[in-house]
Each structure stands twice: as C-alpha cells, then as structure tokens.
Amino acid sequence: MKNSKNILDETPFQTAGPFLHIGCMPNKIKINNLYKNDLGEVPFKNKNEIEMITIEGSVFDGNGIALDDVMLETWQCDENGQFFEDNGFARFIPDKLTKQFKLFTVKPGQVENLDGKNQSPHICLSISSRGLNMTLNTRIYFEGDDLINDPILSMIKNSKGNIDSLVAKKIKKNIYVFDVFLQGNKETVFFDI
C-alpha cells in the first residue's frame, strides 16, 4: 500500500517577467490612477531631509551590463534600531535611461542578533528580475561603520565570501553608492534564506 501521507511537490517559481513593474509599481511606469502611491514609495514617513541618506547604484548582469528591468525591495529598522510594521519597507526600480536606482531612507541603527551581539547597521535588500528563478537576498552595510564585529559578516568572511560586495561606499555627506553584481568575479554575496 502507498504511503498514506499526502506529499506535495514543490511548485515551480516563475521568473519576475516583463509585467513586474505593471503589477508592483504602476505609477513609476506612468500607469496612473490605479493607486494614489505605489507600495513602498516612502520607507519612512515624517522624517526631515537632514535625517535622510541616499543610496544609489545599478544592478549588473553577468556581462557587466546595467539592468533596467529589475525591482528592488528593502526592509530596515529606523535610526534607533527599531522595526515598525508601517515603516522601513521600500520598493524601487532603476531609471530607464540611466539604469540607476535611488533609495531615499534613514541610515539604520544597530540591531541585536539572537546571540545578544549587535549587528552593524544594514538594510536587507531583495532583487527580482527577468531570468532569476527566485528572489535574490543580500544586505547593504555602510563604509565607515564597525563591520569587523558583525556576527553575520564574520560568517561570510569565514566562508571566503566577498564582504566588500556588501558595503555601500560613501561619496558625499549623506550619499552612498551600492552596486549589485548578479554574476562574475565581482558577484555580490547573496543569502540563502
């Protein structure tokens, strides 16, 4: 007799496809009047410009070509290390002409790890794009912060991962550059979560 347990096969993951922006960010591609604002347009409400930072960059494929048909989503704590259900999420896409994205947000504070150690300030980043069979997940850390004692980065260092691929470079007072490389010798470290 067959095993009586019902075992379900894993369903296939569909790539993000050409309709990604239509369904998730209609206002950004000039499909107006569906929603007042796209979800995640502003990660933190009621913050003044002095508190804000800008993270700009591009997503590159394996041939080093910047992509414009990609969607990025972030989740982060506020400047005090606190998470809120109605703040901290952002969704954005690269500009069609420059192929650069810009994220306007607050620089996050430290968050306590499960073992009680503090994680360095970081932003969780997920990437969806054509040709990807699943969402890629990584983190954005910040140049100038104490990264040596971060428990997550320590695991990556021990596995010979490219920690530099996770660090946004500061180019002006409140402006950072963070590029994502999907493949190749500069490949960004992605997390299996």
Image (cartoon, helix red, strand yellow):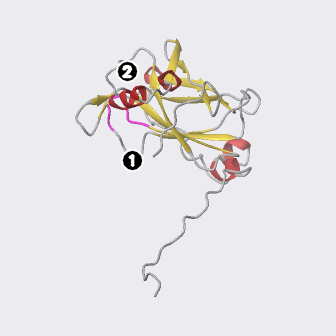
Tell whether 123 sits left or right of 11. Answer: left
Residue at 74% of width from left, 29% of height from top?
A: 65
Decide which of tag 1 and tag 2 comes sooner along the chain.
Answer: 1
Count neighbours of disc 1 (C-alpha within 10 A) and say few if under 14, some if 14 to 19, many if 20 or more.
Answer: few
Residue 118: say if magenta.
no
In the rendered image, residue 33, in percent from the top left (x then y), is placed at 68, 52
Residue at 54% of width from left, 64% of height from top?
A: 10
Query: Which quarter of the figure has residue 80?
Result: top left
Residue sticking out furthest to the bottom: 1
Question: SS class of the residue under badge 2?
Answer: loop
Q: Main secondary structure of the magenta part?
A: loop
Q: Which mark lies nearer to you, 1 or 2?
A: 2
Residue sticking out furthest to the top: 172
- Residue denoted by label 2: 147
Q: Relative to 167, is 84 above or below?
A: below
In the rendered image, residue 23, in percent from the top left (x then y), is placed at 66, 53
In the rendered image, residue 113, in percent from the top left (x then y), is placed at 29, 36
Disc 1 from disc 2: Cα separation:
27 Å
Query: Which quarter of the figure has residue 97?
Result: top right
In the rendered image, residue 177, in percent from the top left (x then y), is placed at 57, 20
- Residue denoted by label 1: 85
Residue at 73% of width from left, 49% of height from top?
A: 31
